[in-house]
Amino acid sequence: MISTVTTTTMTLTQTQVMSLGVIAVISLIVFLALKEILSSEAGKNPSIQSFLNGANVAIIPLLLAFIAIVAYKVLSIA
């Protein structure tokens, strides 16, 4: 039996891309603030310590997205 795979292409408008970029930047700020605030309590509570250890999983891709947004804005101005 031969199966066929169909893919659909998803197109984003400039408004959608800008709103997703804003969400990414706000999420990065929230994660960085939480990590900084909770770092003082890390030694007292093991669940906070595990959150801080796992927070980099979310922070690193958001940071890369932020860098890409800044680079795009700088290149589009020049």
Image: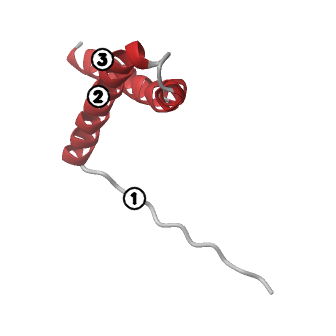
Helix, strand or loop status at disc 1? loop
Residue at image x 24%, y 12%? 78
Q: Are marks 2 and 1 in contact (CB under 8 Å)?
A: no
Going by the numbered disc 2, the residue's amino acid type is Val
- Residue nearer the viewer, 34 or 45: 45
Going by the numbered disc 1, the residue's amino acid type is Met
Residue at image x 63%, y 73%? 5
Q: Are marks 3 and 1 in contact (CB under 8 Å)?
A: no
Q: Between tags 3 and 1, which lies in front?
A: 1
Residue at image x 22%, y 38%? 18
Callout 1: few (<14), some (14-19), or many (20+) C-alpha neighbours within 10 Å? few
Percent of width and height locating residue 77: 21, 16
- CA separation, marks 2 and 1? 29 Å
> In terms of image quadrants, where is residue 70?
top left
Q: What is the residue that sits farthest to the front in this orientation? A: 44
Total number of numbered discs in the rendering:
3
Which is more N-terminal, label 1 or label 3?
A: 1
Percent of width and height locating residue 26: 25, 31
- Residue picked out by circle 1: 10
Q: Between tags 3 and 2, which lies in front?
A: 2
Check residue 30 in the rendering and tell me which mark sits there, or answer none: 2
Q: What is the residue that sits farthest to the bottom in this orientation? A: 1
Check residue 75 in the rendering and tell me which mark sits there, or answer none: 3
- Residue nearer the viewer, 78 or 18: 18
Helix, strand or loop status at disc 3? helix
Above-or-below relation of 54 to 18? above
